[in-house]
């Protein structure tokens, strides 16, 4: 993205933010009292408020500088979602078998990083476009491959490319583990700063919204 800066929002502030996934569902109540529900979005979209992490003047200055360099809503950036930034469970370490990317056919060399949510009824597959550089581990049929020798991962798109002659055999399961950030932008062109405390300014709200790939 030409309108995206590959830089992460200050991590110490992001880790104190609040937010999560949002969906949009249309609910129509019929005359009988029954409901008809329709998903207006096929993907969820994450929203955050990073204002909770600004508790001193140093953090305040950091956010203002970051906001100004992004020109408000103009340029996107990376954001660490503390509740969801791994291909595995929150208390585990990413491994090459965490997420299935697809099945080889002997010729396909390009796969996209994804993360599945749920397993039984209607699993949701989320495209991961901002993996942490160098964090991806890839396996074919359970055998881990070597980054830079067998495959490469574009940290700006989440695309995995197997090198020439390294395409996965037909029927082989391609899996991955990784860390990732959320591509976001500020959802405001105005930061309201509160100097009620002499030594500690704060920004009551710093709305941030996910940029869908």
Image (cartoon, helix red, strand yellow):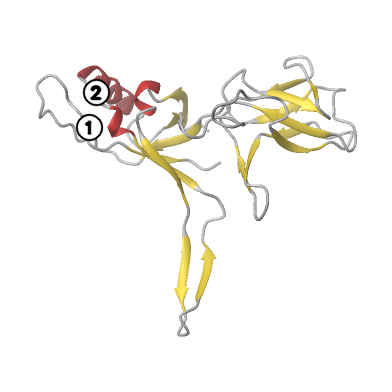
- Seen from this angle, which residue lies furthest front? 91
Residue 173 placed where, x, y %?
A: 81, 35
Residue occupying image coordinates x 73% and y 29%: 97
Identify whether 55 is placed above or below 33.
above
**Of callouts 1 and 2, which one flags the residue occurring earlier in the amino acid sequence?**
2
**Residue for point 56% across, 41% down:** 213
> Which quadrant of the figure has residue 188?
top left
Residue at image location 36% in from the left, 21% down from the top: 12
Structural crowding at the residue carrying mark 2, measured as other residues with C-alpha within 10 Å and reported as few (<14), some (14–19) or many (≥20): many
Depth check: 121 or 14 in front? 121
Residue 10 left/right relative to 21? left
Element under label 2? helix
Residue 129 horizontal/vertical position (percent) = 58, 34
Residue 60 located left or right of residue 122: left
Q: Is residue 6 left or right of residue 14?
A: right
Horizontal and vertical percent for residue 163?
Answer: 80, 22
From the viewer's side, name the closer residue of 205 and 90.
90
What kind of element bears circle 1?
Answer: loop
User: Is residue 188 or residue 32 the one in the foreground?
Assistant: 32
For the residue carrying disc 1, how many other residues have a C-alpha within 10 Å: few (<14), some (14-19), or many (20+)? many
Q: Are marks 1 and 2 in contact (CB under 8 Å)?
A: yes
**Residue that label 2 marks:** 60
Q: Which residue is mark 1?
A: 203
Label 1 and label 2: CA atoms lie apart by 7 Å
**Residue at the extreme bottom:** 31
Where does the image place residue 176, in percent across and percent down from the top left?
70, 29
Q: Is residue 164 left or right of residue 59?
A: right
Give the camera-side residue of 142 and 154: 142
Q: Quadrant of residue 147?
A: top right
């Amino acid at each position: 993205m030409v309108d995206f800066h590959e830089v992460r929002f200050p991590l110490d502030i992001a880790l104190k933010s609040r937010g999560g996934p949002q969906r949009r569902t249309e609910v129509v109540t019929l005359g009988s009292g029954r409901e008809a529900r329709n998903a207006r979005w096929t993907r969820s979209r994450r929203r955050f408020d990073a204002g909770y992490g600004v508790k001193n003047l140093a953090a305040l200055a950091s956010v203002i500088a970051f906001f100004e360099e992004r020109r408000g809503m103009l340029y996107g950036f990376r954001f660490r979602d503390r509740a969801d930034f791994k291909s595995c469970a929150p208390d585990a370490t990413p491994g090459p078998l965490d997420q299935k990317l697809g099945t080889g056919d002997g010729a396909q060399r390009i796969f996209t990083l994804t993360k599945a949510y749920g397993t039984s009824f209607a699993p949701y597959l989320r495209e991961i476009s901002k993996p942490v550089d160098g964090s991806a581990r890839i396996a074919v049929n359970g055998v881990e491959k070597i980054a830079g020798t067998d495959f490469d991962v574009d940290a700006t798109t989440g695309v995995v490319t197997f090198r020439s002659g390294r395409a996965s055999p037909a029927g082989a399961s391609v899996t991955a583990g990784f860390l990732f950030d959320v591509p976001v932008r500020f959802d405001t062109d105005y930061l309201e700063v509160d100097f009620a405390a002499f030594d500690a300014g704060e920004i009551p709200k710093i709305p941030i919204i996910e940029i869908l790939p």
